[in-house]
Image: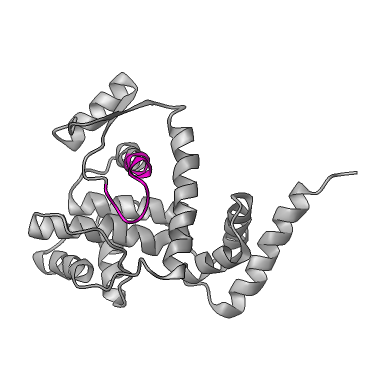
């Protein structure tokens, strides 16, 4: 499915006209969690391909990037345009490497449809951070594809359900995990505790994943119990 002009405009305007949520405690907690994930994921990525940060944009197209990275087992990552209020520039370079690797691994080009697919990949991996990925990946891509320019970076959490629905309908990966499935969510929460998140940060993830409050508390408790039980010494 290809994005229509009207859909692109809806997504682009959602970002351009949206209120910046960066100053909220909830946004800071989500960003801190994402920084931890970036560090862990980048360390794993560099075991698969060498990553080199460069001052000049190294690839002319997605196809060139894909073919060279897979052929050379080296990824060149552009360091430009990395001043962001979200995190340090070097963190942005690492996030860019991870994002590009998602594109390569899943055959997603840099079109709006490809970026929607990249959003779905990221949201499937960390459902609790889906609102952050929606703003960082899909909505910013819509601004570029519609206006052919980059806006100042901010974090937008759209209130319109139609925004996320459009993104999820665009061509991309199928089979994003069902965030309402309790067993999956308990293991997801277990993973959050394994990464060192606090109770408050875990509850933020569950709220962002649209888990109803009456389910979030027992799910969080079960995930924490699993985490603590697995690290307890065995006699």
Residue 138 appears in the figure: yes
Which corner quadrant holds the N terminus? Answer: bottom left
Q: Residue furthest bottom?
A: 214
Please state if 8 lies on the left or on the right of 26 as rendered.
left
Quadrant in which residue 142 is drawn: bottom left
Residue segment shown in magenta: 83-96
Please state if 215 lies on the left or on the right of 225 as rendered.
left
User: Total label count?
Assistant: 0
Quadrant in which residue 176 is drawn: bottom left
Is 3 above or below relative to 162?
above
Name the spot of residue 167 as percent of width and height, x first.
Answer: 27, 62
* Residue 90 within the magenta-colored segment of the rendering: yes
Is 221 above or below relative to 82?
below
Quadrant in which residue 23 is drawn: bottom left
Point 11% across, 69% down: residue: 6
Q: Residue furthest top?
A: 72
Name the spot of residue 180 as percent of width and height, x first.
Answer: 52, 68
Point 26% across, 44% down: residue: 108
In the image shown, does 108 or 139 lie closer to the viewer? 139
Point 36% across, 40% down: residue: 90
Please state if 113 lies on the left or on the right of 210 as rendered.
left
Please state if 9 lies on the left or on the right of 188 as rendered.
left
Name the spot of residue 192 as percent of width and height, x first.
Answer: 58, 55
Name the spot of residue 123 as percent of width and height, x first.
Answer: 41, 56
């Amino acid at each position: 499915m290809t994005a229509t002009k009207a859909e692109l405009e809806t997504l682009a305007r959602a970002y351009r006209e949206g209120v910046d949520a960066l100053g909220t405690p909830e946004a800071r907690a989500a960003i801190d969690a994402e920084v931890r994930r970036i560090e862990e994921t980048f360390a794993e990525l560099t075991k698969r391909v060498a990553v080199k940060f460069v001052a000049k944009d190294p690839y002319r197209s997605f196809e060139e990037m894909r073919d060279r990275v897979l052929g050379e087992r080296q990824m060149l990552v552009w360091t430009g345009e990395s001043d962001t209020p979200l995190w340090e520039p070097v963190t942005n370079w690492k996030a860019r490497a991870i994002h590009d690797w998602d594109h390569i691994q899943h055959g997603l080009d840099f079109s709006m449809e490809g970026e929607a697919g990249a959003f779905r990949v990221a949201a499937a991996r960390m459902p609790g951070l889906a609102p952050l990925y929606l703003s960082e990946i899909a909505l910013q891509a819509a601004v570029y594809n519609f206006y052919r320019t980059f806006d100042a970076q901010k974090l937008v959490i759209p209130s319109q359900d139609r925004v996320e629905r459009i993104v999820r309908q665009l061509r991309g990966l199928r089979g994003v995990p069902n965030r309402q499935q309790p067993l999956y969510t308990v293991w997801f929460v277990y993973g959050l505790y394994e990464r060192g998140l606090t109770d408050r940060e875990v509850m933020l993830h569950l709220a962002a994943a649209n888990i109803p409050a009456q389910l979030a508390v027992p799910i969080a408790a079960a995930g924490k119990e699993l985490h603590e039980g697995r690290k307890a010494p065995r006699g």
